[in-house]
């Protein structure tokens, strides 16, 4: 199967099928209502600085796609919305683009003035197959140039690779590869829906990366995505594996709590659906939140649809800030909240 077809299938499956485990871990975070906020909604400042760039509110549309013809419109719609609203954007894995497959589906975002542009490459692709020696500087340079990236995300997606028939399960040498890249490029490390543990964050800290996108469990599950592909291909073994691993991973709020002590800026993603979830992620220590699936249907439709969806999230965040008496994100990060439900059970068992 070509990369082109696989990328198109991922979009189709994520739009048409249920690809999340079903439990919303971000709903476990509940704020104490402030009945006497003593601030005016008009004075609330939602802006933040991330990796030296100013975002109008703490949100990034994280890596989704690129590498097939249909991705030109999707990325262009997301780019227009992020530029209009002053927030960050990541593109999907640029493996295809740097090898000449539909590069315009990535470079299209250069037509827009986006405050923070994040490139994307998979960790397995950084490892030289024969001698497991760190490699990939040339690929990363090309990937950054393709979209004028400010920062490059190296994604860790071993859950997907292990359930995907054509998966690349080489993992040895990854950390060294990331370390050597981080000497030359502004690198962040990103999961893709299974979360980052405290131990992993500790192992990443100190190798020169700028931050971590925790992308925890509770939103898009690549095990679910690959299960649908395997089912369509009549691959019984991979279908079963996709089902078994559907809710594998660390719930996003738990992953965030785990990583907080590493001291790096954290992007909280994985199951973020609304502005209260964004507020919850800030309260739990994130510098910024990230969404993928929450805007995917809209991104397939039009830039206006993405703008509308993201505007709702921004207004919900502002409302949550008013109702917690938080004039800015620093104040929101100190607002009183509780963690209930499954997330609490996880945190209590650590
Ligand atoms: C269709 C689709 C394709 C994705 N492709 C990539 C990718 O190429 N690289 C990457 O780092 N993450 C990729 N992701 C993962 C997202 O960036 C994000 O980490 C994950 O979907 C969890 O966020 P969500 O629950 O808001 O969807 C993709 C997500 C979706 C929905």
Image (tube, rainbow, N blue to C red):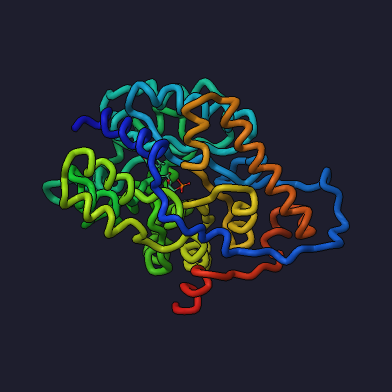
State which quadrant residue 308 falls in.
top right
Q: Position of residue 82 (x, y in %)?
A: 58, 32
Quadrant of the drawing holding the N terminus: top left
Residue 164 in the image: above or below residue 251 = above
Q: Nearer the viewer, residue 348 or 255?
A: 348
Residue 118 in the image: above or below residue 74 = below
Q: Is residue 21 left or right of residue 265?
A: left
For the point 58% across and 57% down, which residue is it? 281
Q: Position of residue 87 (x, y in %)?
A: 60, 38
Whether residue 101 is visible to the viewer of this picture, yes or no, is yes
For the point 58% across and 44% down, which residue is it? 59
For the point 60% across and 54% down, which residue is it? 277
Q: Position of residue 154 (x, y in %)?
A: 37, 46
Spot the residue most to the bottom: 349
Whether residue 176 is visible to the viewer of this picture, yes or no, is no
- Count up the numbered dots: 0
Q: Position of residue 163 (x, y in %)?
A: 23, 51
Q: Nearer the viewer, residue 193 or 329?
A: 193
For the point 66% across and 37% down, which residue is it? 311
State which quadrant residue 80 falls in.
top right
Quadrant of the drawing holding the C terminus: bottom left
Q: Point out the quarter of the image occupied by ligand 1.
A: top left
């Amino acid at each position: 199967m070509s990369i082109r077809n696989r990328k198109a299938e991922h979009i189709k499956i994520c739009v048409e099928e249920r690809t999340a485990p079903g439990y919303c871990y971000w709903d476990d975070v509940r704020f104490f209502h402030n009945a006497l906020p003593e601030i005016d909604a008009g004075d609330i400042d939602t802006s933040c600085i991330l990796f030296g760039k100013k975002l109008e509110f703490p949100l990034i549309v994280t890596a989704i796609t690129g590498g097939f013809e249909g991705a030109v419109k999707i990325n262009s719609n997301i780019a227009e919305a992020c530029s209009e609203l002053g927030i960050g954007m990541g593109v999907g894995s640029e493996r295809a683009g740097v090898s000449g497959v539909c590069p315009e589906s990535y470079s299209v975002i250069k037509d827009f003035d986006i405050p923070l542009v994040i490139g994307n490459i998979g960790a397995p692709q950084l490892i030289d197959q024969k001698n497991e020696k760190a490699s990939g500087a040339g690929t990363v340079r090309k990937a950054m140039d393709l979209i004028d990236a400010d920062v490059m995300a190296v994604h860790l997606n071993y859950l997907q690779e292990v359930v995907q028939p054509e998966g690349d399960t080489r993992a040895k040498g990854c950390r060294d590869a990331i370390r050597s890249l981080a000497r030359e490029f502004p690198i962040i490390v990103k999961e893709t829906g299974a979360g980052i543990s405290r131990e992993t964050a500790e192992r990443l800290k100190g190798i020169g990366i700028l931050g971590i996108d925790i992308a925890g469990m509770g939103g898009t599950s690549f095990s679910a995505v690959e299960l649908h592909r395997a089912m369509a291909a009549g691959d019984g073994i991979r279908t079963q594996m996709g089902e078994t691993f559907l809710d594998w991973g660390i719930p996003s709020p738990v992953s965030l709590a785990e990583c907080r002590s590493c001291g790096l800026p954290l992007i909280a993603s994985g199951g973020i659906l609304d502005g209260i979830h964004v507020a919850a992620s800030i309260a739990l220590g994130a510098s910024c939140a990230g969404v993928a699936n929450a805007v995917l249907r809209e991104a397939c439709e039009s830039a206006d649809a993405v703008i509308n969806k993201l505007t709702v999230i921004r207004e919900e965040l502002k409302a949550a800030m008013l109702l917690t008496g938080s004039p800015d994100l620093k104040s929101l990060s100190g607002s009183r909240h509780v963690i209930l439900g499954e997330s609490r059970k996880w945190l209590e068992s650590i």
